[in-house]
Image (spheres, rainbow, N blue to C red):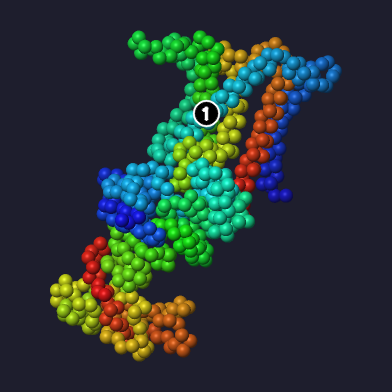
Amino acid sequence: MAFLELSNIRKQFSSNAAPAVQDFNLSVERGEFVSFLGPSGCGKTTTLRMIAGFEQPTAGKIAINGADVTHIPANKRRIGMVFQSYALFPNMTVADNIGFGLRVAHRPKAEIEARVEEMLKLIHLTNRAKHYPAQLSGGQQQRVALARAIAIKPELLLLDEPLSALDAKIRVSLRTEIRAIQRQTGVTAVYVTHDQEEAMSLSDRIVVMSEGRIEQVGTPFEIYNFPKTQFVASFVGTLNQLTARVVDRTVGTLDLEGQQIVGPKLDEAINGEMISIALRPEMIDLDGAGKGEAVNHLRGRVEETTFLGSIVRTRVKLRDSVISFDTFNNPNLTLPQRGAEITVVFPREAVLTLKPSRGTVESEI
Amino acid sequence: MKRSTVWGWFWVILGVLYLVIPLWGAFDFSLRAERDVIGFAAYARAFADDDFWRTFIFSNQMALISIVISVLLIVLTAYWVQLKLPQLRPIVEFITLLPFVIPAIILVFGYIKLYSRPLAVGPISLLPPLTNTDFSTNILLVAGYVVLALPYMYRSVDNGLRAIDVRTLTEAAQSLGANWITIMFRIIMPNLRAALLSGALLTFAIVVGELTIATFLGRPAFGPYLQLLGQHKAYEPAALSIASFLLTWGAMILIYFVTRGTETQTTGAH
């Protein structure tokens, strides 16, 4: 039995509005770090708030450690939560904030002090115990918020875009810290973010959501390399989305704007049908770059070459469409010139054939 | 010096003089109770009057009770409206403006009309006449004061609540196991300290100086005492007015120091 079980969860804020969340089914194992990833308004925060008990599902069931908590009030669910706005109590010091949950639970004073001390060491803020939240930086406040949430040894840790309000550098260091603390404590965590890099670097599994529904659940590797729908493919990482005509579905031959390429076998397609395909920029390379034998060649004209530091991004115009490909920067590299004729290559497995959002799987491997 | 600065200072000085000159006049008058002597005789006589202390203590007691009831009623209401029922905000704000529209004399006549006879439903008596005993009349008096203080206390509390993220703080406290009472008394109210003090001061000033309701309910409050004193004495009312003014200023200075302490909690280096 999974530690956190969401079964057929549906949330509708009003009878004449579209559901904010629907057909949501998810099992999370104990100790797992799962992220809800999606654009604003996709229902990820609403789902998190239902797990926390701040919203009631219109339908469905939520169980934590085997117990049905669907209608249990938030303050009885033994969860810890970290908010985007930190939500530290302004009238309490750092130590008092961390110890708040333990005082509410009427733990002995000695136990509270020891646990607060332990948390302060964990977040490396022992010298800030008597400071007030307004005297801390954003990153420090969020660490205190995290310590406060785990001080009570919750069964489940919920994090609602905790890094969104922080600057980029702090975000990177703090997310590493969050993951380290989660591993150290072994608490099961559900994390909400719209930042794919954050989700992929932190998570054991990612739940990609769109318009209130789950698009795909998988490890970061699976989500990125084997997206199941157009939405997942376009939301996670950059993607070249193209339309091609099926020439031979048994082999996987496609006609892409007058040029033939080979992708996966297309058991469910019809010869002559127009389908959507996608290519990851990093799977495409310049012809002759020596990355091994490539099956597919595409000829085009260089539209733009952008130097991005460690990456060089080149946009190539085919007959009608434009595709981008990335190469690692190399001082010996001769950058493709604008207007030059160019041939790019990519392997068969780079071709992703995608169903529309919330469709069935068609891409291979 | 720029022309705008000159005019600015002109209006500031004019405003200060407008306030200070009458005060100085009252203060100067209060020092001349004895012929050809500048002294505090009027103050001594005023403070030696037993009626002064009786009515002043009574009004302070009523003020304190009114403040407590106002705080509990208005903080809970404003908090719940902000958290769960924001669509009711316009209605609540309208209600809190009614004391500005309805004069105190109408209010007290309404009380007397309604509560001077038993409140009954058929043969069942729900409430005896409230004007028959001192204790029950004091209840009416406090109710009147709470209504008069409503606009000031509500606005103070509402402004204070808007300055904090009520929803997220509530949810954070709930996630840590807190119930509503803990949230209200350990999170919300401590963060409304400045707002509550402002509201309390305004309530105090209203109650201590209030005349109409106390007079018509026949209660021994400070407002009617001052009015009576003014009809028979000259220097003592001036002395007590200056004393009241200093008391108000003392309370405002107290608020300043208290809120400066809370600012240290809410501002700082990042």
Does residue A218 appear to the left or right of B132 in the view shown?
left
Which quadrant would the C terminus of chain B be assigned to in this image? bottom right
* Chain hosting mark 1: B
Spot occupied by residue A56 in the image (x, y as percentages of width and height): 33, 45
A172 or A126, nearer to the observer: A126
Is residue B162 in view? Answer: no
A77 or A328, nearer to the observer: A77
A230 or A129, nearer to the observer: A129
- In which quadrant of the rendered view does residue A119 lie? bottom right
Does residue B6 appear to the left or right of A286 in the view shown?
right
Spot occupied by residue B245 in the image (x, y as percentages of width and height): 68, 27
Is residue B257 in view? Answer: yes
B165 or B95, nearer to the observer: B165
Reading the image, the residue beneath label 1 is B70
> For mark 1, does the 10 Å Cα neighbourhood hold few (<14), some (14 to 19), or many (20 or more) residues?
many
Label tally: 1
Residue, x 44% and y 47% (percent of image)?
B175
The amino acid marked with disc number 1 is: Ser
